Amino acid sequence: MLPRKNEMADIPNDAPAMTAAVRPSVLSLVIKEKAALYSAYMPFLKQGGIFVPTNKNYNLGDEIYLILTLLDDPNKYPIAGKVAWVTPSTAGNNKSQGIGVHFPGDDSGTRIKQRIEELLGSALRSTRITHTL
């Protein structure tokens, strides 16, 4: 029986809340050239990060699962990170739309940061323009 107008249905206080689990977005990024890696790497983030071109809209703090392939390395690096940077489609200065994914503060994040810095070597000291700063 439905409640009458102006009458509340009885809902127990201990009824479980109906919430949907939010799954992280899954993205894939293949970087084939050292110059592209330099432009995408975000060393100014505490654990490091990488810029991922995408047309999809994200918010800061969104969870992202990224599969990263670097240059000639046969390994695919899985990264469970968070959005720390957003470049919207309306950005000026010919900046590509996309997001910066902050690497996690665990061993996997440390390993990918070290691997990228190993691949970039002395290029890290360059002042060339990047996708972020």
Image: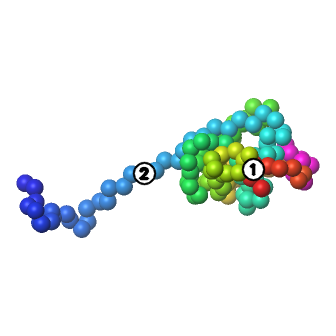
Assess whether mark 1 and mark 2 are in contact (beta carbons under 8 angstroms).
no
Q: Is residue 52 left or right of residue 126?
A: left
Label ID, residue 93: 1
Q: Position of residue 3 (x, y in %)?
A: 10, 60
- Between 15 and 53, the one nearer to me in the picture: 53
Binning the other alpha carbons within 10 Å of mark 2 as few (below 14), some (14 to 19) or many (20 upward) gives: few
The N terminus, quarter of image? bottom left
Which amino acid is tagged 2?
A: Ala
Is residue 39 part of the magenta span, yes or no? no
Q: Crowding at label 1, few (<14), some or many (≥20) Cα neighbours within 10 Å? A: few
Query: Which quarter of the image is occupied by the C terminus?
Result: bottom right
Image spot of residue 91 (x, y percent): 67, 51
Q: Amino acid at mark 1?
A: Asn
State the residue at coordinates (66%, 55%).
Answer: 85
Left or right: 105 as drawn, with respect to 10:
right
Residue 53 image offset from top left, x and y in percent: 67, 42
> Tag 1 or tag 2, which sits nearer the N-term?
2
Numbered disc 1: secondary structure:
loop
Q: Residue at x 26, y 66 (%)?
A: 14
What span is colored magenta in the figure? 118-125
- The answer to whether one can see residue 118 in this image is no
Q: Main secondary structure of the magenta part?
A: helix
Question: What label does residue 21 carry, if any?
Answer: 2
Q: Nearer the viewer, mark 2 or mark 1?
A: 1
Seen from the viewer's position, the closer of residues 9 and 54 is: 54
Residue drawn at x 36%, y 55% is 19
Is 51 placed left or right of 116 in the picture? left
Which sits in the foreground, 128 or 115? 128
